[in-house]
Image: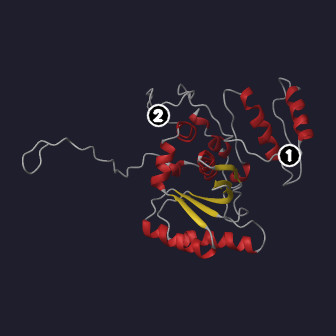
Amino acid sequence: MTDAMGNDRPMERLPVTSTRHELNFAALSPFDFERLCLWLISRRPSYSNAEHIGAAGRDHGRDIVARRWVDGRVELVYVQCKRLRSTPGRQVFASEIAKISAAVVQGVIARPDRIVFIVTQYLSGDLRASVSALCQEVGYAVEFLGLSELDRDVNADAEILAEFFDLTPRLTAAWRPAGVPFERVTPRHLGPARLGFVNRTAELGLLEGAVASRTASSKVLVIEGPSGAGKSRLAEEWAQRNKSGYPDGQLLVDFRALRASPAGGVAEALRLSAY
C-alpha cells in the first residue's frame, strides 16, 4: 500500500465493525432465553449465587438474582431478560425499574445495588444514558448487555453455543477449550449449581433410596407436596449432585412456562429435535 507521496506503507489491519447477527435468540423459548442469561451471568467474573426465579407475574421485575463482589463487599444484583422483536423504548425499562422500586417499598423484595438488563436488540447510547439516569434517581447502578454484547459473549462460550443453538465452533487447537467435547451436542439443561440448599438431608436420602430401588417397569419418580414447598428445588439439587452419573446429558422442562402451550409443548421446550 502506498501513501499520497508514493511511499510504501505497511497495510493496516482494520477492526471488524460488522453488525451482522448470526444467533437467532428469537427462536428460543422465554424459559430457555432466561436460562441462557443465567449461564452468562454465572460465568461472569465476580458474580456468584445466580438464581433463576423468573416465574411470570411473580418475579417483581427480577428474572435472575445474583451476588457480585466489588471492592470487598457484596452487591445484590437483579437481572431482567428481555427477548424482544423490536427496539425497546425508554418506557420498557422505566416500567421494570418502577416495578422493582414498588416491591422494595412494599417490603416484598430487598433493595438491589445493581440492575442488569439483557436485551436481544441493539441499544443506542442515548437510550442507555436515559435509563441510567432513571436508575440513578432511585439509587441503583445499571448495566446493559444489548445485542452487541450478547452476541459477543455467547459466541465466545462453546458450551452455550452447543446447548442453546446446536452450534459447534471451528475446531482449532488454539480456540478449543481444554476438555470441551465437540463430537456431539450433549444436553446440559441443569445449568450451573446453586448454593444455599439446607435442611433437606432426609428428603435427599429418600430420593436416593427411591432412585436406587427403581425397577425396569418403574422409571419415573414423582415428588409430591404443596405449592411452594420446594419440590422443584429438591429435584434440581439431587440432579446437580448426581449428574456425573448421567454422562449422556440431563433434560429439564419448566411446566410453569408451558401452561398456555399447545399439546406437544414439552417436546418443543426440551428441543428434542436438536438431539
How far across and how far down the image is residue 8, in percent?
A: 12, 41
- The reply, left or right, for residue 105 in relation to residue 7 is right
Q: Is residue 263 above or below residue 108?
A: above
| Residue at the spot of label 2 | 169
Q: Secondary structure at mark 2?
A: loop
* Real-space CA distance between mark 1 and mark 2, rounded to the nearest whole angstrom: 39 Å
Q: Residues within 10 Å of mark 2 (few under 14, many from 20)?
A: some
How far across and how far down the image is residue 202, in percent?
A: 93, 39
Of 273 and 23, which appears nearest the observer? 23
- The disc label shown at residue 198, or none: 1
- The reply, left or right, for residue 84 in relation to residue 49 is left
Q: Is residue 99 above or below residue 53?
A: below
Look at label 2 and name its amino acid: Pro
User: Which residue occupies 80% across, 37% down?
Assistant: 238
Which is nearer the N-term, disc 1 or disc 2? 2
Taking the view exactly as shown, the residue that stands out farthest to the front is: 72
Q: Residues within 10 Å of mark 1 (few under 14, many from 20)?
A: few
How far across and how far down the image is residue 221, in percent?
A: 84, 36
- The reply, left or right, for residue 270 in relation to residue 19 is right
Q: How many marks?
A: 2
